Image (cartoon, helix red, strand yellow):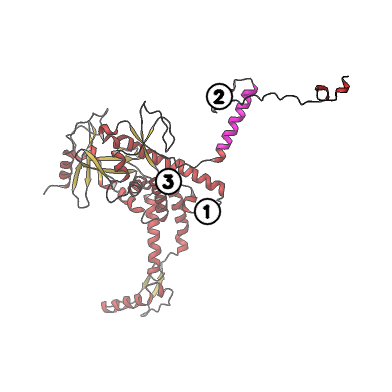
Amino acid sequence: MRSPVGELLSAASRVLARPRNDAAVPYVGRGGYGGTAVSSATGDQTAALEATGANGTLFAIINQLSTSVAALDWHMHQTGKAQTVVCEVCEEPGVRYVAEHPSLAVWSKPNDFFTSMLYVETFQQHLDLVGEAWWVVAYLGNRPIELWPVRPDRMAPVRDPKKFISGYVYRAPDGQLIPLRLDEVVMLRTPAPWDPYRGAGAVQTLISQLYGAKYASEWNRRFFENSAIPGGVIEMPVHLSDPEWDEFQARWAESHRGVRNAHTVATLEHGAKWIDTKYTQKDMEFSELRRATREEIREAFAVHSQVLGLSENVNRANAEAGEYGWAKRLVVPRGERIKDALNGPYLKLFGAMGKGYEYAYTSPVPEDREADNAERTSKAQAYSILIAAGVDPDDAAQQAGLPPMRRAPAPRPQPAPAGPDRGGGDDSAAR
């Protein structure tokens, strides 16, 4: 039987044949691949992926982020010096809106089981949780036809001392190792400072706090399951036989186990004495622990409290500011990372058909009316100052950041009204 390491190295060796440009410097040792060929995921990736099912605050943040990013409105541009029109969707100049393209068809319907929104939402969850998102590409001949999201803790780059990455290995749930070529995988990641091959997510910095919150919740559950008494010692002055001990345990459990038996009076026989060793819920300070964990999760994701439905000290002004900050500081950077992957490795999969095209999305940032009004007022004041100083109006508009403005035509002189001294009076005065 082959060892798991031997099987892993065998899978890695099958993806090394495709030629690629050499890396500028080696990121792994040259002395054979040994145990360094595959940059495996760390164990806390699996824990981070599962953490959303055990913490409501984390679930709310990840859900809000993934659904907001999945709701971005994507479209395609045709670029190049011949394109002088304005995109009819995003009004960007110098590009032409493209309604149909092979890559756009795949992106709009990744596969028969994932809609576009579900696909983006799935890999965005992975990206926010562990800092990695993996797209596995299915082909029909040489043409990409499907995209599949894959769990990061099942994927590993094959590190190469010359080519940086020679391929990838997917570990199936049954342990089977499947080699993948470079053109079968698109990887998005938040770079891990300690590993150029892997990503790092906010949840990996919170594992200890999340485990603490999980254990506190488990303690609470057991508190009620065990008749609302966490623990104690029954001191027996006499030795009980096995049948007597079994009978004592059964009677104690029947009388005191479970919430319905909470706080019932206990009667002890044979001179037994109860010694209390419990900690109360007040002693454990669960509310403070939960509040601290919630704040640490929010800080790790830089999320405003109103995203979680916390409405303390919220008015319309700071609510709108929160929506603006959410879109600009959280949704847009995530959209830019996806756009970078679409316009880079993804379009490259389509060969010549991908050249001269790029993906774009409609900005989710709401208009900041107050800032727009302040900017408009500032520009108008600068324009007035320049005009008063004798600057040409067109030059003044350019310096103030305003578009060229046509000057209104000078008003035509109006004829003077007729009167007695202008030939409109009595003739007798002349005579």
**Residues at discs 1 and 2 in contact (Cβ within 8 Å):** no
- Residue 399 is marked as 2
Q: Nearer the viewer, mark 1 or mark 2?
A: 2
Q: Identify the residue at horizontal 55%, vertical 40% (top origin).
A: 369
Where 31 falls versus 260 (above or below)? above
Q: CA distance from mark 1 to mark 2?
A: 44 Å
Looking at the image, the residue that sits furthest to the left is: 1
Q: CA distance from mark 2 to mark 3?
A: 40 Å
The C terminus - image quarter: top right
What secondary structure is the magenta-colored segment mainly?
helix
Q: Position of residue 11 (x, y in %)?
A: 17, 42
Q: Identify the residue at horizontal 38%, vertical 41% (top origin).
A: 74
Q: Position of residue 177 (x, y in %)?
A: 19, 46
- Specify few, some or many for label 3: CA neighbours under 10 Å numbering under 14, 14-19, or 20 or more: some
Q: Which residue is mark 3?
A: 301
- Residue 311 is marked as 1
Task: Please tell me which of labels 1 and 3 falls first in the chain.
Answer: 3
Task: Please tell me which of labels 2 and 3 falls first in the chain.
Answer: 3
Q: Secondary structure at mark 3?
A: helix
Residue type beneath disc 2: Gln
Q: Which residues are magenta?
A: 372-390
Q: Position of residue 327 (x, y in %)?
A: 46, 43
Residue type beneath disc 3: Phe
Q: Secondary structure at mark 1?
A: loop
Examine the rendering and report whether any part of residue 36 can be seen. Answer: no
Q: Is residue 377 magenta?
A: yes
Q: Nearer the viewer, mark 1 or mark 3?
A: 1
- Specify few, some or many for label 1: CA neighbours under 10 Å numbering under 14, 14-19, or 20 or more: few
Q: Secondary structure at mark 2?
A: helix
Where 52 falls versus 345 (above or below)? below
In this rendered view, identify the residue nearer to me: 20 or 163.
20
